[in-house]
Amino acid sequence: MTITIPEVSPATVGKLIALFERAVGLYASLIGINAYHQPGVQAGKQAADAVLEVQAKAVHHVRSNPAQAYSLEELAQAIGEDSEIETLFAILRHLAANGDVQHQPGSGEAAEGEQEQLTPTKPCGRMRPVEFCLPCPPFS
């Protein structure tokens, strides 16, 4: 079977996608499968909700205590997410990758009591380097 379209445009591509969606749904119903039942999608949404909840707690806590410096472990304890330390690390790494914070690793192995730091990418002078903080609000 060949499908020919007069031009490639958003409308024709959309019609092709709709055609294939309907074909999959029809075929699935013929062989007794619910093509639209996707438990993996629901599980992914629940997992994402949990990560977003940890991120919201961390951001709220840091914004509520701007003068306080936190290590990863201290921040996890402060927000009551000790068991989610790897998730929190990934969140902080994501913030650093997006330029919201800057990761400043120590030189080689950190001496006792030293920790790697995350600092704002654009310090405003009122914040000292901390293990994790958010960027300053924009100047008006």
Image: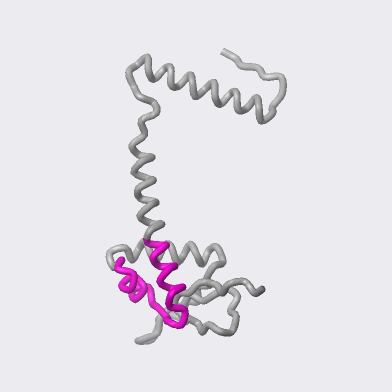
Extreme residue in the left direction: 83
- Compared with residue 5, is residue 114 higher up or lower down, i.e. above or below? below
Residue at 32% x, 18% y: name it. 32
Where is residue 125 shown, x and y percent of the image?
59, 84
The answer to which of 96 and 75 lies nearer the viewer is 75
State the predominant SS element of the stretch in magenta.
helix
The magenta stretch is 54-81
Extreme residue in the front direction: 140
Position of residue 99 in the picture relative to residue 5 (left or right): left
Residue at 47% x, 79% y: name it. 66
Residue at 51% x, 67% y: name it. 96
**Which quadrant of the figure has residue 98?**
bottom right
Where is residue 4 shown, x and y percent of the image?
65, 17
Give yes or no for residue 27 being in the magenta stretch. Answer: no
The answer to which of 116 and 110 lies nearer the viewer is 116
Quarter of the figure with the C terminus: bottom right
Where is residue 27 shown, x and y percent of the image?
42, 17
Residue at 43% x, 73% y: name it. 62
Extreme residue in the right direction: 7
Where is residue 99 shown, x and y percent of the image?
56, 66
Quarter of the figure with the N terminus: top right
**Which quadrant of the figure has residue 75?**
bottom left
Position of residue 100 in the picture relative to residue 92 (left or right): right
Position of residue 62 in the picture relative to residue 123 (left or right): left
- Compared with residue 106, is residue 76 higher up or lower down, i.e. above or below? above
